[in-house]
Amino acid sequence: MAFKDIRKSRKWLSPHEIRIIIGFLLIFAALLALNVYLARTVVGGEWLMMRWNAVRSFLGLQVDRSVGLKGWRTMPDGESVILRPVPNIYGGEIAHSIQQVVYGREAFATEYKYILSDPFPFVLLYTPLAFLTNFPIVRAVWMLLAEIALLLSVLFSYRLSEWEPPLGLNIILIGFGLFSFFSLNALLTASPAILLNLLYLGALLALRSHSDELAGALLLFAAYQWEVGGLFFLLIIIFVFANRRWGVLAGFGMSLILLMILSFLVDPGWGLPYIRSVLSNLLQARNLNLGAIISGWFPEVRFSLGWLVSVVLVGVVAIESIGALYAPFRRLVWVASLALAAMPLAGLAIFPANYLVLILPMVLVVSLIWERWPRGRLVAMTLILLLFIVAPYYLYTKTVLAYNPFYTELLSVLPSVLMIIALYWMRWWVVHSPRIWADRIGNLR
């Protein structure tokens, strides 16, 4: 005997659901309009412009037909076409145009030259934006996606920290994620670090839920900027091999093979120019990394303090990764936070926008303070939030009002140092399981 399903089915949305959808659409429209205004009035977006110009050049969407014209050829149907060489997106032409935006001139020898160093498969991901001819509109659309990614990063950090903050603290942390100096810097410069950070957090969530193939695929799309997540990948490699989570490697490998086949079918000759651009950027990192900063502070030191710090940090992250192999997942999240916070000091180029990855470490530290320090938590959290929200703006204003390299260098070094100190300050509470009975005694006093 068949029983009829008595559950109500609806073909239309309810009025309440329609109002919610309309509300979200209005918010997105208002954000997009604000982003268009900012894109047209505030100079920036150089990281996006570099990749947008590269894709458009490769697709021939902004070809100057008076330059590079090899000759005319008449096809059998009588139509004439222009033959042009395949552009080198890793060359200096695109870099010079970005330097004009950033510096108003060509870069000096000690300045970053904005040479594209992304693998060609990842450059192709910007193809949908290449068909938009107005760069302010392109930048506004990207900013909208980046703002959503920042909000999701805060929410993902809550889940990884296994914590639900109260309403007031939730608003403050979302404000930190959206309006901190480093987040705004990443938004205005259109840094890909925003999306990379979301991929890191998504990969951690996938690992926690044992969706290993998904974690591997997410890690692949975030694997090309080592100055942001190099130590994070060291942690993941140790975790995968020690726990024999081969599904992560399978997801990574399958996605890599598909992207490589597609990219070499589109442009078989991109490999060598890409390698040259990577080497060029590594050479530029000598003037933009921790070693260069420390050498300026301590010129009398005979050996490289920067390399010493880099080796120590790599060793610390490796040791902490081994210690977190069989611990609760929250300890792995703590090590991931340490890896993201320490990466700017690991010897590669330092860019302020990359510090937005401190969202996860900040949420983890605040969650531990909230859970374990019921009496002094308001004072501790206020000091930490003020330090990481106000101090960067203060240092930045010092460099704007009267340029002083010392404040710029402090802005490049202090966030990592302070976050590492904060993480180790709360490390005991992560390594050791909570003593419920003792904690309750402390709360009852």
Image: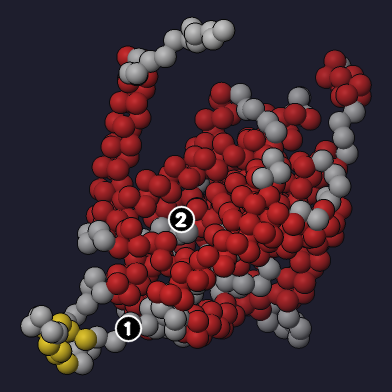
- Splitting the image into 4 quarters, where does residue 170 fall? top right
Residue 97 shows in the view: yes
Residue 186 has which mark?
A: 2
- Splitting the image into 4 quarters, where does residue 54 fall? bottom left
Q: Position of residue 438 (x, y in %)?
A: 91, 24
Image quadrant where one finds the N terminus = top right
Disc nearest the viewer among 1 and 2: 1
Tell me: 136 left or right of 392.
left
Q: Which residue is mark 1?
A: 86
Tell me: 105 left or right of 322.
left
Disc 2 marks which amino acid? Ala
What residue sits 25% from the left and 59% below the top? 132
Q: Is residue 129 above or below residue 381?
A: below
Q: Secondary structure at mark 2?
A: helix
Q: Position of residue 344 (x, y in %)?
A: 63, 64
Compare marks 1 and 2 and give the one earlier in the sequence: 1
| Residue at far front of view | 1
Disc 1 marks which amino acid? Val
